Image: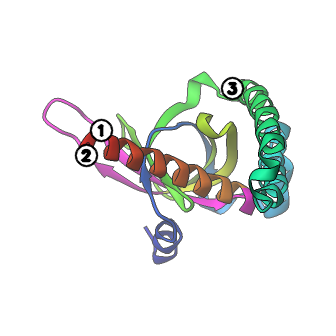
C-alpha cells in the first residue's frame, strides 16, 4: 500500500459493518479509465438514487427550522420519502449481481475491507457496487485493491482485502459517510440499551 493509498483510506472513519458489495475485476492499475469514461459508465439507477438522496436532504432542512408548527407536513413528507425509498431499494436490488457478491467487513468514505477465501492480486482496479439497504441507496465506484492480508486461522483460510475508492462521485462518498454515521448511531443506541 502506497502512502497516498493509505492517506486516502485513513482520511475517513471505518465502521465495522456488513453491507453487500459486487466486485468485478477491471484490470491492471495502468488501465484505470479517465474521469469522463467513469462518469459515462455509471448506471442510471445509481445516478437517480444519489440525486434523490441529495434532494431529500435539501428539501427537509428548511422545514426543521420551522419547529413544531410544521410537524404534520414534515411527517407527511417523510412518509412520502419512505415510499420512494422503498421503490428505489427494489430497483437497486436488480443491480446486485449474484456472481460477484461479497460482504464488507468495514467501510467508510475512503474505502472498504472484505474477506475472501483466496488471495487477490493487489494494485488492480475493480468496479464496485455497494448496497446500503437501510439508506435505500447504492454507490457505483472504481476502487484499487491495496492490500491482501492472510488472516487464516486453524480451521479457516481467509484473506482480508482493502479497497481504496479511486473514482467516486463526491455525493456518493457523502452517502457512504452518512450511512456509516447512521449505522454507528444505531450501534451505540443498541449498546446503551443492552447496558441498562
Q: Residues within 10 Å of mark 3 (few under 14, many from 20)?
A: some
Tell me the residue at 68%/51% (across/down): 141
Q: Which residue is mark 1?
A: 158
Taking depth in this image into account, of 42 and 70 the one nearest to the observer is: 70
Q: Residues within 10 Å of mark 1 (few under 14, many from 20)?
A: some
From the viewer's perspective, is 163 left or right of 72? left
- Secondary structure of the residue carrying tag 1 is loop
Taking depth in this image into account, of 22 and 105 the one nearest to the observer is: 105
Q: What numbered label is drawn on residue 151? A: 2
Q: Which residue is mark 3?
A: 93
Q: What numbered label is drawn on residue 137? A: none
The total of numbered circles placed on residues is 3
Residue 131 visible, this angle: no
Q: Are marks 3 and 1 in contact (CB under 8 Å)?
A: no
Q: Are marks 2 and 1 in contact (CB under 8 Å)?
A: yes
> Which sits earlier in the primary sequence, circle 3 or circle 2?
3
Tell me the residue at 73%/63% (across/down): 170
On the image, the x and y values in percent for residue 5 come to 50, 69
Amino acid at each position: 500500500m502506497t502512502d497516498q493509498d493509505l492517506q486516502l483510506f485513513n482520511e475517513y472513519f471505518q465502521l465495522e459493518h456488513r453491507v453487500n458489495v459486487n466486485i468485478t475485476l477491471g484490470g491492471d492499475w495502468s488501465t484505470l479509465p479517465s474521469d469522463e469514461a467513469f462518469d459515462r459508465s455509471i448506471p442510471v439507477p445509481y445516478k437517480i438514487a444519489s440525486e434523490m438522496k441529495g434532494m431529500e436532504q435539501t428539501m427537509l432542512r428548511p422545514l426543521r427550522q420551522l419547529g413544531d408548527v410544521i410537524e404534520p407536513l414534515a411527517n407527511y413528507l417523510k412518509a412520502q420519502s419512505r415510499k420512494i425509498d422503498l421503490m428505489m431499494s427494489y430497483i437497486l436490488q436488480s443491480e446486485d449481481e449474484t456472481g460477484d457478491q461479497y460482504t464488507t467487513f468495514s467501510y467508510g468514505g475512503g474505502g472498504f475491507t472484505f474477506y475472501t477465501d483466496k488471495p487477490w492480486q493487489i494494485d488492480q482496479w475493480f468496479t464496485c457496487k455497494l448496497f446500503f439497504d437501510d439508506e435505500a441507496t447504492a454507490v457505483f465506484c472504481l476502487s484499487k485493491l491495496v492490500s491482501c492480508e492472510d488472516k487464516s486461522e486453524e480451521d479457516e483460510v481467509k484473506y482480508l482485502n482493502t479497497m481504496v475508492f479511486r473514482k467516486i462521485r463526491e455525493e456518493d462518498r457523502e452517502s457512504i459517510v452518512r450511512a456509516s454515521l447512521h449505522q454507528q448511531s444505531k450501534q451505540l443506541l443498541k449498546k446503551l440499551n443492552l447496558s441498562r
